[in-house]
Image: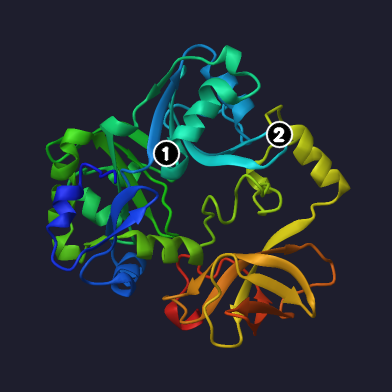
């Protein structure tokens, strides 16, 4: 299995549990456990090693227009220092991957890709998409880059002990050259947990030092290392999509209710014609939230029924640590007759379990615990 440059750091932790995650040996949890890590990010801060993610640099005079064609969101109008969430689509409108794009300069963009899709994404960007003949220079930075995620309401206070004016980095912006202790890093302010937080990118050789520097800076704030388990429960509560679940090569952004990131009226892009047709003829499926009425865990792939008819399936499901409920996202047939509070059934281990349609996201930052 592949290992990130941080492997030796966390492999030495007592009680750490490592798993095979898409061919990477990564921590699913540390000694404190998933629930404690989840609670730390919601109330204090947690530190994640996400160096398995892929990165590449797309540069040149045509870089902006080329990425504009590949991406559903607009890229050419981005300001230097801005980050933007987007997706790449196949010509049929389904999703190659979802990405974060960083505009480094007028002619240079950092593209952050999902780990399991990095090889496929690079092939799509460089040679497999319909306009690959005009591909500008692309450099794969994945092996030489460490990415850490510092997430939680105290993350700005922690990072401020190392980067005094980090509070000036606004949401979905970044600063390229930050001295974080003795390490030079790119620092951005996005996140995948539903909380405030930062991503820090540095050279792979500097990764262990940056990890230890951040943990030491956060010691008095209750910062703890966190694994993939809590990362998943956190993103699910906040309705942040996971490739292969809420979006995939068989699910379109419109079906996943991500139309805000699809600029159908503003520009041309790969997959636009298919998505326009889907919008005009009727989007057949919709991503909705359910809360289980019968105690059971609705796992990914479980079928969903309305009466005797299967109308869809679970994309992601778990017990919400913040809310104490069993909940899930389901991709189901779109019907104007379905409304919040309506009862569906999820087939779990051969038995039908009742669930009701509810509003999402399940968790919103800043909501008092008493109101959840």
The image shows residue 208, relative to residue 30, as above or below, that is above
Q: Give the residue at mark 2.
A: 271
**Residue reaching furthest front?**
350
Label 2 sits on a secondary structure element that is loop
Total numbered circles: 2
Q: Quadrant of residue 175?
A: top left
**Marked residue nearer the N-terminal end (1 or 2):** 1
| Left or right, residue 136 beside residue 92 | left
**Residue reaching furthest right?**
281
The image shows residue 161, relative to residue 113, as above or below, that is below
**Residue at (51% x, 11% y) in the render:** 61
Q: Give the residue at mark 1.
A: 173
Looking at the picture, how far across and down is residue 113, in whole percent? Answer: 45, 38
What's the image's color scheme?
rainbow
Looking at the picture, how far across and down is residue 12, in whole percent? Answer: 12, 57
In front of the other: 282 or 154: 282
């Amino acid at each position: 299995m592949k290992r990130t440059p941080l492997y030796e750091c966390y492999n030495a932790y007592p009680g750490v549990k490592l798993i095979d995650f898409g061919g990477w040996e990564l921590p699913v949890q540390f000694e404190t456990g998933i629930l404690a890590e989840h609670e730390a990010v919601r109330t204090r801060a947690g530190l994640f090693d996400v160096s398995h993610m892929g990165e590449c640099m797309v540069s040149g005079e045509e870089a902006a227009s080329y990425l504009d064609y590949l991406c559903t969101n607009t890229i050419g109008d981005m300001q230097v220092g801005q980050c933007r969430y987007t997706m790449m689509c196949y010509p049929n409108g389904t999703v190659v991957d979802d990405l974060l794009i960083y505009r480094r300069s007028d002619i240079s963009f950092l593209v952050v890709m999902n780990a399991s899709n990095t090889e496929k994404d690079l092939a799509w960007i460089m040679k497999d998409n319909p306009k690959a003949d005009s591909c500008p220079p692309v450099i794969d930075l994945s092996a030489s880059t460490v990415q850490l995620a510092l997430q939680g309401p105290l993350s700005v206070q922690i990072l401020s002990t190392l980067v005094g004016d980090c509070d000036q980095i606004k949401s979905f912006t970044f600063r390229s050259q930050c001295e974080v202790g003795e390490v030079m890093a790119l620092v951005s302010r996005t996140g995948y947990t539903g909380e405030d937080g930062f991503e820090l990118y540095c050279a792979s050789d500097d990764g262990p030092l940056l990890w230890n520097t951040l943990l030491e800076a956060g010691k008095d704030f209750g910062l703890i290392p966190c694994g993939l388990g809590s990362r998943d429960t956190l993103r699910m509560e906040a309705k942040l999509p996971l490739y292969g679940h809420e979006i995939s090569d068989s699910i379109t952004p419109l079906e996943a209710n991500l139309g805000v990131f699809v600029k159908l009226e503003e520009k041309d892009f790969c997959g636009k014609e298919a998505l326009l047709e889907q919008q005009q003829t009727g989007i057949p499926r919709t991503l909705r939230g359910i809360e289980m009425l019968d105690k059971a865990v609705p796992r990914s792939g479980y079928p969903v029924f309305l009466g005797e008819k299967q109308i869809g399936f679970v994309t992601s499901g778990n017990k919400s640590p913040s809310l104490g409920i069993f909940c899930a996202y389901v991709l189901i047939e779109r019907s104007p007759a379905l409304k919040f509070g309506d009862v569906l059934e999820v087939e779990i281990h051969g038995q039908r379990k009742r669930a009701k349609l509810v509003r999402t996201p399940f968790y919103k930052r800043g909501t008092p615990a008493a109101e959840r």
